[in-house]
Amino acid sequence: MPCCEIVYHSQCGIDRLFSGGYYSNIECLCGNHLHDSPYYSSVSSSEQVSVEEGNALLEGDAKADMKKLKEKSKELSTARKEFEHHLKEEFAAFEEIALPQLEAIKGLKEARIAAIKQSAQYKAFSSKKTSFTLMFGKFQKKFPTIPRRSIRNKIGPNSFCYRYNSSLMMLRRKFRLRKWY
């Protein structure tokens, strides 16, 4: 390591250096700071003091400022509790008004989906999708060494998006309610 004589395996060193990423402080096993997050400290690692020295400073020069900071922290905590209580009450009032309307919308949604499931287009698509999936499974059993990527390149990528290419998933995504609130 650049800060000491500790030697890591290559992968262990990489894991150690990149374990926290940019937003975390990263330290070597010897205790030196290898990376200071811009969110945790604006002081360089050479200017930082030990915990014991910091405690001594808090009891000395910074005692009055620390007391003021602690009072502000208590005020913030009290204000947060009051705001959370107010927010809870307001949301309960909103929910009382909006919930019946939301239930009506959900009923309309389910009725429309049920109607779509009875359509000829839905049934044809579901049938073709099932038929393709079964044939693809048989093809893979017959030719297990051919990579899926090669098959996808020959046939086309649209047939293989299983997650979004099912009829039920397409219905759920199209009629999801979260896009309105």
Image (spheres, helix red, strand yellow):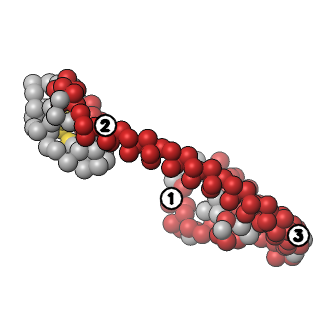
Residue that label 1 marks: 149
Between the residue at mark 3 and the residue at mark 1, the CA separation in whole angstroms equals 40 Å
Give percent across and percent down for residue 166: 71, 63
In the rendered structure, find residue 111 and report the number of the disc placed on it. Answer: 3
Mark 3 near mark 2, Cβ–Cβ under 8 Å? Answer: no
In the rendered structure, find residue 181 and report the number of the disc placed on it. Answer: none
Q: Nearer the viewer, residue 33 or 77?
A: 77
Q: Nearer the viewer, residue 71 or 95?
A: 71
Give percent across and percent down for residue 125: 77, 70
Which quarter of the image is occupied by the C terminus?
bottom right
User: Is residue 104 shown left or right of residue 175?
Assistant: right
Q: Is residue 46 visible?
A: yes
Up the image or down, 151 lies above or below 57; here it is: below
Total numbered labels: 3
Disc 3 vs disc 2: which is toward the camera?
2
Which quarter of the image is occupied by the N terminus?
top left
User: Is residue 13 shown left or right of residue 160?
Assistant: left
Residue 46 occupies quadrant: top left
Residue 179 occupies quadrant: bottom right
Residue that label 2 marks: 67
Q: Earlier in the sequence, mark 3 or mark 1?
A: 3
Q: Earlier in the sequence, mark 1 or mark 2?
A: 2
Disc 1 vs disc 2: which is toward the camera?
2
